[in-house]
Amino acid sequence: MTDEAGRTMHLLDGRRVTLADLIAAGLLKPGERVRFSRPRMGQTYVAEVLESGRLRLADGDEYRSPSRAAMVAANMRAVDGWHAWVLESTGASLDALRQDLLDQAVADTVEEAEVSDDEVGSPAQVHEWLRTARVRAEGDAPERISVRELLSFWGVRDRGDQIVRIEADLANHGLATRPNFRSVTLETRVTIITAAQEADQETDEAVEAAVTPADDEDEAESRYIGLMVGNLASALAGAESVKPTATLEEAKTKLLLNDYSQLAVLSGKHNLRGAVTWQSIAQALLDDPHAVLADAIVPARDVSYRSDLLTVLDELRRRGFLFVRNESNEIAGIVTAADVAGRYGEMANPFILIGDLDRLLRRVIIRKITLAEVVATCDPSGNRIKSHDDMAMGDYQRVLENPALWAKLGLPLDRATFVARINTIRTVRNAVMHFNPDPLPDNTVAHLSMINDLLRKYAI
C-alpha cells in the first residue's frame, strides 16, 4: 500500500476533510482567493487561502472552518461554508473540490489497498450510498430511514465507537440528518438532507449542526457524547394536548382514556401555553366547583430534544415532566421523571457488574502475574501503569491473551474462549462508561453475572 493510499484511506475513516487536505492533494493552492456572494443582499465577501489550511478574511481574522469563516463574514447564524465559498479563478465551490478528493480517495483505497468495494461498511460502499443520498436530497426526494437502517450502511448496530466516523462521512458529503441521528432513538426515522438545507432552516437546531462547527474541527468532533433528551423513547413519540379553549371535561377525558397524568395546552404546534394535570384540576375544583380549563392551567417547561439529559435532571425533578421540542421546534413529546429513572436503571446493573468484574480480574492477575510482567505486556514505555490498580479492561485482555501469562494463572479454562468473552464485555464496558444512547444487548446482565460467578472461584 502506498503512502498516498494510506493517507486517503485514513481520510475516509472517521475524519472530516479540511482545507489542508485539499492543499495537500493539489486541489487548492495557498494564495488563492475565494468569494461568498449573497446577490439578494448585494454583498460579496472575499477570503484568502493560507498555507496553514485556513481562510483569512478581509479584516485579517483566520478560520480553519469554511462555515465559521462564512458565518463571521456575513454575520449569519448558520451557513454551509463549503458550498458558499467558491474559487475566484474557476467558480468551483470548496465542496466540489472536497467531492473530487473523496472520489480519488475511494479509488486509491480500492485499487492500492485492495479493499473490497462491495463489503458492507467499506469506504466505497458508504461513499456510493452517500453520493446517491445527496442526489436525492438535492432533488427534493430525500431518503427517510430509521437510525437503525442508517447505521447498517456502516455495518454497525449501535452508535458506539463508529459515531464519529459516521458524522464525519456525512459532513464530508455535505449531508446531515433531520432530526440529528445522534440525539434520538434507534427507531426514529430521520431525513437525509444537505448541510445547506440544514443551514437554511435558520433555527437553533441549525446553529448546533455540522454546518456550524467550531473553528477547530477536532473540537467540534469532541463534543459531549452522552444521553440526550431525544434518546428517551417518549421524547418524540407525541404529546397529547388540548387547546386553551377546551373544556375541563375534554381534558379529563383525554387523561382518563390515555392513562396520562398531564396534558400539554397548545395553541398551534409551536405555542406551549402550559399544562393541565390531575393535581391542577383537583386544585382548581377545590378553589371553585365551577372552574373551567383556564383555571387548571399551570406553567410548563419545554426543552430541545438535543438537550444534554444531565442538564435537565434538576428541572425534571422539580416539575416531574418536561415537554420536548423536535427539530422543527414543535412540541413533539414529553419526558417524565419515571422515563429517566427507567433509562438510568437499565444502565445501573451493568455498571455495577462491570465494577465487580474489574476487581475480580485484577485480583486473579495480582496473585500470579508480577507488576513488571504487566508493564512489559501492556505498557512497555512504563508511563501509564505504576501499579496493578492502574490496569484497564484492555490491559486485562492483553495479559490474558499472552499464552505464557495465561499459563501462569493456572485457570482450568480455554484461553481463546475466555478471552473472546472478555473482548465482548470490553465493548459493553465502553458503551456503559461512555453512556452509549443505544440499549445494551439483552444478554448483557446474564453474561456479566456468569463471568463474575466463575471468577469468584479463582479470586479467593
Image (tube, helix red, strand yellow):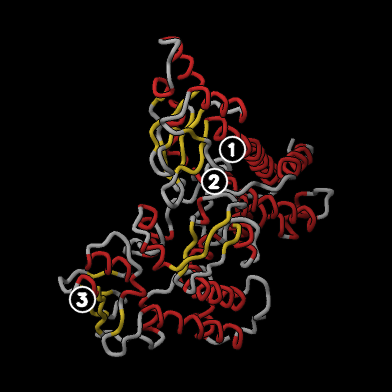
For the residues carrying marks 2 and 1, which lies nearer the camera in this image? 2
Q: Position of residue 266 (x, y in %)?
A: 43, 36
The quadrant of the rendering that contains the C terminus is: top right
Q: Does residue 391 appear in the picture of this structure? A: no
Q: Does residue 39 appear to the left or right of 66 in the view shown?
A: left
Element class at badge 2: helix
Q: Nearer the viewer, residue 408 or 269?
A: 269
Vertical arrangement, residue 257 with respect to residue 385, above or below: above
Q: Which residue is mark 3?
A: 44
Residue type beneath disc 2: Asn
For the residues carrying marks 3 and 1, which lies nearer the camera in this image? 3
Query: What residue is shown at x 40% (from left), y 25% (from top)?
Result: 298
**Do labels 2 and 1 touch, CB within 8 Å?**
yes
Vertical arrangement, residue 167 with respect to residue 7, above or below: above
Q: Which mark is residue 231?
A: 2
Q: Position of residue 184 (x, y in %)?
A: 54, 50
